[in-house]
Image (cartoon, rainbow, N blue to C red):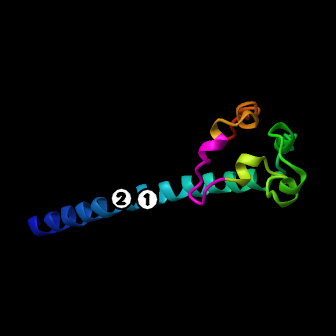
């Protein structure tokens, strides 16, 4: 009888030792998939149109330079076009009046649904 009880405790211990981490992992996977679906839905929404400042007029660029400027031909603001490959802004963009006067995006809080 002791052998059967010991075996039962061993099986219960192994199940708990494996079931709790597996359950926790499945729960985290479920939460992350829901979050990914939400982010995918947000990414599919049409971007908000923001009026682009004409930085070449503010900075007084000559017409030859405007023709070859990537920022003038892009729908993005100039500081977004001129970002470095690592995502940082250039130093001259940080002190530019166009960047400083740019509107700050606002956060809209939406009701949560469970």
Q: Is residue 61 above or below residue 85?
A: above
**For residue 26, above or below residue 35:** below
Displayed quadrant of residue 100:
top right
Q: Is residue 92 magenta?
A: yes
Instruction: Check disc 2 and report the residue beneath it.
Output: 21
The residue depicted at 68 percent of the width and 51 percent of the height is: 38
The one of 47 and 28 positioned closer to us in this rendering: 47
Number of the label disc, if any, that sits on residue 34: none
Q: Gap in Å between the C-alphas at discs 2 and 1?
A: 6 Å
Q: Is residue 85 visible?
A: yes
Residue drawn at x 11%, y 69% is 3
Instruction: Compare residues 53 and 110 and report the one nearer the observer.
Output: 53
| x and y, in percent, of residue 4 in the image | 16, 68
Instruction: Using the image, tell me which numbered label, if any, was put on residue 25.
Output: 1
Question: Is 54 colored magenta in this rendering?
Answer: no
Query: Relative to residue 15, is residue 30 drawn left or right?
Result: right
Circle 1: element type: helix
Start and end of the magenta stretch? 83-93
Few, some or many residues within 10 Å of mark 2 (<14, 14–19, 20+): few
Q: Is residue 1 left or right of residue 106?
A: left
Q: Residue at x 74, y 50 (%)?
A: 42
């Amino acid at each position: 009888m002791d052998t059967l009880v010991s075996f039962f405790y061993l099986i219960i211990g192994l199940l708990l030792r494996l079931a709790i981490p597996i359950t926790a992992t499945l729960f985290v996977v479920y939460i992350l998939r829901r979050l990914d679906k939400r982010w995918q839905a947000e990414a599919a929404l049409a971007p908000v149109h923001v009026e682009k400042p004409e930085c070449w007029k503010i900075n007084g660029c000559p017409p030859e330079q405007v023709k070859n400027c990537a920022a003038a031909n892009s729908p993005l603001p100039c500081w977004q076009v001129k970002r470095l490959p690592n995502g940082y802004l250039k130093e001259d963009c940080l002190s530019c009046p166009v960047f400083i006067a740019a509107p700050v995006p606002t956060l809209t809080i939406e009701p949560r649904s469970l």
